[in-house]
Amino acid sequence: MSGRRRRARELALQLLYQRDVAGTSPEEMFARTDEYRNAAPEVQEYASRLVLGTLGRLAELDEMLGKQSDHWRLGRMPVVDRNLLRVALYELLHEDETPDPVVIDEAVEIAKKFSTPSSAPFINGVLDGIRRNLFGAREASPRRSRPAPAGSR
């Protein structure tokens, strides 16, 4: 399943990139992206969950990312990094199936594949900083219940 989850995360990044650069609607992204249409149903389901969830909470995610990366405004970040941070933060906050370290590691590995050499440490630092600020030193097991971030829900 982890290979499928990685593929879904990469696909979500690709779709969010389209939206960020071209303003493409989710319906259009899903319909016109061959990689999405040709993906396994489990990959499509998780990718669409990540995309729609990220877009549905974009203001919350961007606010948190802006606070954590105070030396880098979101608009100045490379488009890939910005969207990878968004989808990974959404997954950290709202998808309880995957342990925090796995979410962060996946984002770092995807950054190594799709972005610049300096992106992976930057993404790791931003996501880990948010995780520590919100949840402290909690265990690395899947999250079943936890406090909601201020202002969400």
Image: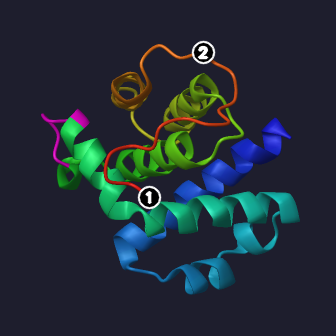
Apparent side of residue 51 relative to residue 148 in the rendered image (left or right): right
- Of badges 1 and 2, nearer the viewer stands 1
Q: Which mark is residue 153?
A: 1
Query: Which residue type carries mark 1?
Result: Arg
Which of these two is toward me, 144 or 61?
144
Per the image, the residue denoted by label 2 is: 139
> Do we see residue 68 in this rendering?
yes
How packed is label 1: few (under 14 Cα within 10 Å), some, or many (20 or more)?
Answer: few
Image color mode: rainbow
Tell me the magenta residue range.
68-73
- Expressed as whole percent of the image width and height from the top left, the position of residue 153 reads 44, 58
- Expressed as whole percent of the image width and height from the top left, the position of residue 129 reads 34, 24
Above or below residue 135? Residue 92 is: below
Q: Residue at x 47, y 37 (%)?
A: 147
Q: Is residue 66 magenta?
A: no
- The dominant secondary structure in magenta is loop
Above or below residue 2? Residue 37 is: below
Q: Residue at x 41, y 31 (%)?
A: 127
